[in-house]
Image (cartoon, helix red, strand yellow):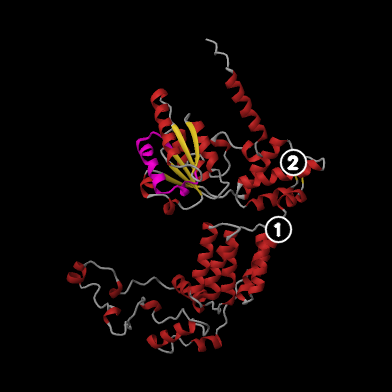
Amino acid sequence: MPSPPRQPDDLFEAALRERVRERAPLAARMRPRSIDDIVGQRHLLGPGAPLRALIESDRLSSIILWGPPGTGKTTLASVVATQTSREFVALSAVTAGVKDVREVLEGARRRLAEDASGTILFLDEVHRFNKSQQDALLPGVESGIVTLIGATTENPFFEVNAPLLSRSTVFRLEPLSPDDLVLVIDRALRHEGADIDDEGRAHLADLAGGDGRAALTTLEMALALAEADGRRRVSLSDVERARQSRVLRYGEDDHYDVISAFIKSIRGSDPDAGLYWLARMLQAGEDARFIARRLVILASEDVGMADPTALLVADAAARAVEFVGLPEAQLNLAHAVLHLAAAPKSNTVMAALARAAEDAARTPGGPVPGPLRSVHPYQRRKLKEGDGYRYPHNEPSGFVEQEYRPSEVAGRVYYRPSPHGAEAGAAERLRRLWGDAAYDSEEWWRFEKFHDPSR
């Protein structure tokens, strides 16, 4: 039976959608239509991955997609609706209210009753919904009237109400890798019938910082600049002008040289040099997480017990990179650089661990001393095992001198405190407890030379 002729209103809507599509930003025109078109998120969408399996089997219940901007949250929600043949309704938590939610739920209820068609409610910035707005969603989510797909850049475990969270599965989306971004860029260039030089492509991927939408937005501007000069090939200069940023890329060898200079500047207590190398790495598009990891390592390796708070500061900066992201997290990294550079220095943590590891590798693994073993009361009572341990908290001083190691390594000294910063106080306390011979930091410092690891 032939299809009925299209009505004027249908033709108008179709023409309007086509015009909107043609005029849409490049990021919108390049939006994937299927799971296989989505770039990145292989831990969720690769063959056999959990989210892909739920989508392909049409067994997806309400979910919350948590990840930084430009990682595909909106795209994924749209693909899910297409793949599962459900109606896709989008709301923004910034502008929508309880009335809007109730209207969507009523429409979904009617749709389900009339033609057994399901509805996906995509709620962008779900963390921006207040308690009453989130509560309005609960009946529809709990009954299955709608399948909620919430999107958020904030930790949903802090921002989303527990009742709604308990009815949803949280999936975390990761920033796109440089290889993923190159794939996105090249796909868009083919679509636009254009090209880009290698330096421009690499710089564009660096600038995007894991954000696919940002990469396409910058590429669209760079394409316009190239076309204004009568070219269809985007250059490095076009990318720089599109983002108004000077490129400071460096090769693999320079990468290691720059991070080495960064670490050695902080170890050498030069805060200004540390800040310079930090700024140079950030402008060159270095991964902020890589920089943060190096600071966390340095806090224990080069500052250590001389300032025990250094590790807390470095760890806080690393967490800020994940939680806040660039560009704001540059301040947190700079804070850590200044603290670590200004702190007293000691590498005794690294040296002590190396000595202990050497003994653990070279000496026989003796049994745990009887008093230190974890024993059942039956063993202690019937077999007389585990006796002899003295509980330090029962002593007025809070300390008991007793042997805590197998006989093979008894008396060996691994930790040799330096006289620097807070470590001098730790050394003094250990000397009082265990005797001067074991923890005479000045004596060790006079004869001990520590290995300077190559960076």
Label 2 residue SS: strand
Residue 138 appears at what percent x and percent y?
37, 41
Q: Nearer the viewer, mark 1 or mark 2?
A: 2
Label 2 sits on residue: 195
- The disc placed on residue 251 is 1
Going 25% across and 78% down the picture, which residue do you hit?
388
Along the horizontal axis of the image, is 199 left or right of 87? right
Q: Is residue 171 magenta?
A: no
Secondary structure found at label 1 = loop
Residue interval drawn in magenta: 124-147
> Toward the viewer: 424 or 382?
424
- Residue at point 65%, 36% (across, down): 24
Return the x and y of residue 445 as percentages of the image width and height.
54, 86
Q: Is residue 1 above or below residue 27?
A: above
Along the horizontal axis of the image, is 153 left or right of 246?
A: left
Report whether residue 361 is seen: yes
Per the image, is 125 magenta? Answer: yes
Report the number of discs: 2
> Considering depth in this image, is 261 or 94 the residue closer to the camera?
94
Give the spatial CA distance, label 1 vs label 2: 23 Å
Task: Name the spot of residue 8 as percent of width and height, x first.
Answer: 60, 18
Quarter holding residue 317: bottom right
Q: Amino acid at mark 1?
A: Gly
- Seen as rendered, the residue at the extreme right is 230
